[in-house]
Image: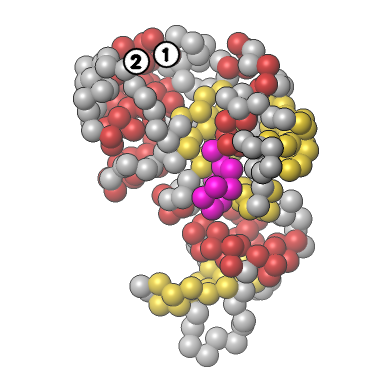
Amino acid sequence: MIHVQGLEFGYKRSRKVFRGLGLELGQGSITGLLGRNGEGKTTLLKLLTGQLLRQSGQLEVLGHDPKCRQVPFLQQVYLLPEEVAVPSISIAKFFEVNGAFYPNYDAAMGRELLQIFSLSPEMNLKKISQGQKKKALIAFALALRVPLLLMDEPTNGLDIPSKSEFRRVLAQYTSDEQTIIISTHQVRDLEQIIDSVLVLEQGAIICQATVSEVASRLRFAPVQPGETTQPLYTEQSPLGLLGVFARGEDEEAEDFSMELFFNALLAARPAVLSTLQSQDLTK
């Protein structure tokens, strides 16, 4: 599905965003792409879709080189950016005009999704609220049914009920054959639906793992008084002190916390990666 080796790219010659980036990602997963501001999450998504052109290295997506921007490739991939400039037309017309470029576009699915999001097809995209526009564009992206769907901060601008609707439609209206990559800072919005995580740090992928793999090695739980096991990382929360622990063989897996995992990687990277290393989860 996605093969990246030795990828280099920079907006300026003096500063490279990526130096020798490598990535292998197979078909059929929902992956959360995490990283601090400025680490290159949006840049990577644009490179995968051919909106930016790599400077060196190998990049293959769906059997194509995105740099060539061939029509058979562009018909199979879609990037929903964080912000979209929309014309002053109805939602229905936007779907009709732009959906025609994608062979798998499902107009009936688009109408169903608009109904779920409480949107009328006759609404003018230019005149509705930012949250409504975001939901309309999410509905359009899902209705395209492309093999590779990339989303950049899709929950930004959504209220709490809309975020719940987003998680529900993502689970219901995507197939097992689709690969979906979601770049986000709103990690709590995704932890119930993602299958795997990619973490970018200093221009490299420091961790690529499935949620089940992480949960098999790490335990996410409150730090109990008199705790005898030394946590790898702790942070204060309204619920008390939370910790990330190396999970023992006889310990039951706790609920996965993507936010806690990400914070632990940033603050206690050597300890966390060392714990994961035994199952070859790091890159």
Residue 118 drawn above or below residue 182: above
Q: Position of residue 152 (x, y in %)?
A: 48, 37
Q: Does the magenta segment cover residue 142?
A: no
Dot 1 amino acid type: Asn
Q: Is residue 104 above or below residue 50?
A: above
Q: Which residue is mark 1?
A: 98
Examine the image and state in which quarter residue 50 appears: top right
Quick check: 63 left or right of 140?
right
Q: Which residue is mark 2?
A: 94
Q: Which residues are magenta?
A: 32-42
Let me know if residue 58 appears in the view: yes
Q: Could one spot residue 253 in this view of the protein?
A: no
Please tell me which residue is depicted at 57% across the width and 30% down the height of the picture.
46
Q: Which numbered tag is attached to residue 160? A: none
Image coordinates of residue 269 in percent, x first then y, are 65, 65
The residue positioned 44% from the left and 75% from the top of the image is 236
What residue is at 53 percent from the left and 74 percent from the top?
234
- Vertical arrangement, residue 209 with respect to residue 135, above or below: below
Point 57% across, 73% down: residue: 233
Percent coordinates x, y for residue 245 in the rendering: 60, 73
Q: Is residue 35 magenta?
A: yes
On the image, the x and y values in percent for residue 16 come to 68, 42
Q: Which image quarter is the N terminus in?
A: top right
